[in-house]
Image: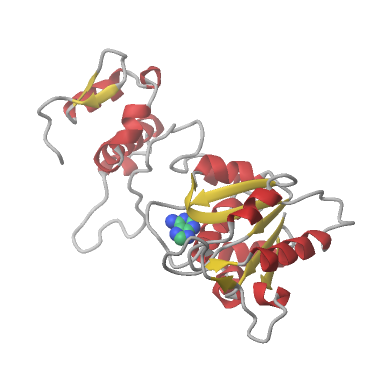
Amino acid sequence: MRIDVVTIFPEYLEPLNVSLVGKARTRGTLDVRVHDLREWTHDRHNTVDDTPYGGGPGMVMKPDVWGEALDAVAASGEGEGEGAPALVVPTPSGRPFTQELAVELAAKPWLVFAPARYEGIDRRVIDDYATRWEVHEVSIGDYVLAGGEAAVLVITEAVARLLPGVLGNAESHRDDSFAPGAMADLLEGPVYTKPPVWRERGIPEVLLSGHHGRIARWRRDEAFRRTAAHRPDLIERCDPAAFDKHDRALLAELGWEPGPDGRFGRAAGAVEE
Ligand code: ADE
């Protein structure tokens, strides 16, 4: 997969040289190219922004600079046989970034990221490229960052670990919280390693039992407990057909009950944990 990032802070993307993404680059699984947006400015001050039409605070990134930059990046891929890239624009007003979108993006041969600073990029840039390229405006959460670069790091890491051959153990994806299928839409429960006693804390007996069935059951129960406590919305969304008798009993114990449509909700009067 090829990834281009156009930014006014190329050094912000240094973490892409480290760890999993860095290794994927060294191995050649991932071809990451970071570009300085100011290369496509023509004035003495390398201006990338201007005041907003209609007034208001802050500055808006100029469409002409972004247009030249994106055209140049696209042209650099011509002859590599990849066609048009998918453009990813991180913005708090985008569609929420989820594991599902990470899987979708991981299937693309070429992503171009356009992280904005200031109040954002002139809207015409997104509208123009959307006529020729696939464009994804993506938010990594309900909070406002100073710019999109941190979001590029987040999205790139989530995508890169899904590329074939990047994670050592192909099984590692299967139990990911939010991985489609398997432990459908439950958060992962706690994990333990040696030593067996640390600061007088042992580990749950069942994990030492060697009994695979009981261990799987315990892990599922812990996943339910954690999901009910931290992400009740995920339980509410679950298709109740995915719950067995034991799941239902545990949910009842945690203060959940099925509603008229069969989906589980917090029982009236249930106490918050
Ligand atoms: N830029 C600023 N805040 C952001 C967010 N929450 N997600 C993606 N890009 C952003």
Image position of 206 (left or right of 142): left
| In the rendered image, the vertical position of residue 59 relative to residue 179, given as above or below | below
- Residue closer to the observer: 220 or 230: 230
| In the rendered image, the vertical position of residue 180 relative to residue 207, given as above or below | above
Q: Residue furthest top?
A: 260
What residue is rendered at 63% in x and 85% in y?
A: 45
Please tell me in which quadrant of the rendered image residue 252 appears.
top left
Q: Quadrant of the N terminus?
A: bottom right
Q: Position of residue 112 (x, y in %)?
A: 68, 57
Image position of 181 (left or right of 261): right
What residue is rendered at 20% in x and 64% in y?
A: 199
What residue is rendered at 70% in x and 51% in y?
A: 129
Please tell me in which quadrant of the rendered image residue 239 appears.
top left
Q: Position of residue 153 (x, y in %)?
A: 54, 62
Image position of 103 (left or right of 225): right
Count of residue discs: 0
Q: Residue furthest front?
A: 54
Q: How is the image coloured?
A: secondary structure
- Residue closer to the observer: 168 or 114: 114
| In the rendered image, the vertical position of residue 95 relative to residue 13, given as above or below | above
Q: Position of residue 20 (x, y in %)?
A: 58, 62
Image position of 191 (left or right of 165): left
Q: Quadrant of the C terminus?
A: top left
